[in-house]
Image (cartoon, rainbow, N blue to C red):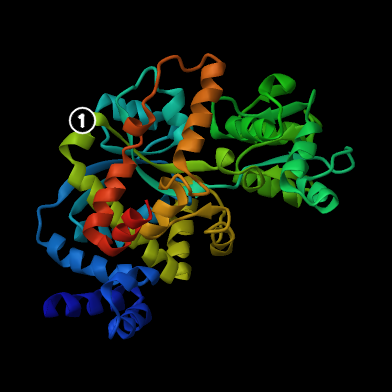
Amino acid sequence: MLFNLLYAVVECERLGIRNEFKSLVKIRRGMKIKNLILFPTISLFLTFNTWVVSAADHLTPIRLGMTAFQDMLAIKVGDEQGIYKRVGLDIEFINLPYAAITEALAGGSLDLGCICETTVVTTWDNFPNQRIANIFYTFEGSAIMVRPNAGFKTYDDFVGELGDHSKALAATVAQLKGRDILTTKSTDMEMGVGAALAAGGLGMSDVKIVDMNPNDGLAAFLTGTADAYLGGLPQRFRLVKEGMLTLVTAQDVGSEAVVLCGFLTTESFLKKNFDALVKFANGTFITLQYVNANQDAAFGRISGLLNSMTGAQMSVKDIKNLWNKIEFFPSTGAEMYWLLVSPSGNRYWRDRMEFVYDFYSKQGQVKNSMDFDEVFAFAPVLESYMKKHEPDAWAVIQQSK
């Protein structure tokens, strides 16, 4: 135990979270163990004990398919800090276009790949052995954009007038009936449109979708095509700078519009390497704790990687404006559970999965049935992680049921 404690001090110093560890030790004195879960930094102490044990273990190799997104690159930062090796994993990063991730997994050239739940649903008929092994963050940055002086009132306008969320959402969405909306089909962007329409009592048949990739769609919208536009974050930021209005956002709509982003695996890898996926969850939570405690350094590295890999020009400030504001990264198992695994969570995973499946099923793009509990393998992975690394928090969860 003394060795573990000394090792934790050294690691906290190296990772730049020494103050958190000092606070943790002060809190620990005279406190009952069951109360430790009330302090997020305590999980660091419990995790560091695990690191010491895992460091001597055989490293499990994982071929991880990644696309250069600023959010996903936090995993790379954690690996560069030695976090994943310390929990027992040897990660090989394989850069692939996002559209190629699922095919590579199905073909056996990857063990894990970055995905969102929409991709799982739209590829389900051809790849029924896929399993969601990890949720890394929720993306809540989609927004339907409209031109100023085009006769639209925004959701915020209606909230001010009506003072009621549901009424404001219905009134906002009603303005889109019969309109042309520019977006990208079979993606989270189309799902963002569908979720907003459904929340306001409309369906996809009530609008006309103009299908273009995000950049071409942006250029077309700026030159007068369509009445509304929903693209990615870069396009949304560009339109705001151009003076366009944000009609309604994913955060206004609710859980059906929130994208679950994480890592996909196969049924066979899940069965053979379940413990490795628990270690991956452990390493990911530690990585997020490191990033939160060292934002300037971590975001500097993320922006450097992103800009060199994609030619983007994203600054540290740009990433700070997204981190835990538009993209939310739960950094403990307890936080993750209460956010999206618990049925009472305001980002409950099943709400989103069922909505996406129903959406594409009605359009005839997915025909085979889906066992959501079987597909969402992150639930048992998280349970195993918490029993091992956050047992007191897990006990409270069990008592609450």
Name the amino acid, label 1: Ser
**Residue at figure coordinates x 32%, y 29% from the top left:** 130
The residue where tag 1 is placed is 268
- Residue 222 in which image quadrant: top right
Crowding at mark 1 (Cα within 10 Å: few <14, some 14-19, many 20+): few
User: In this rendering, does residue 99 appear at all?
Assistant: no
Q: Position of residue 331 (x, y in %)?
A: 40, 60
Callout 1 secondary element = helix
Q: Is residue 268 left or right of residue 237?
A: left
**Residue at figure coordinates x 23%, y 52% from the top left:** 279
- Residue 84 in which image quadrant: bottom left
Q: How many marks?
A: 1
**Residue at figure coordinates x 80%, y 38% from the top left:** 171
Q: Is residue 316 left or right of residue 5?
A: right
Q: Position of residue 384 (x, y in %)?
A: 24, 50
In the rendered image, the vertical position of residue 73 relative to residue 230, given as above or below? below
Q: Is residue 203 left or right of residue 43?
A: right
- Residue 18 in which image quadrant: bottom left
Foreground of the two, 158 or 260: 158
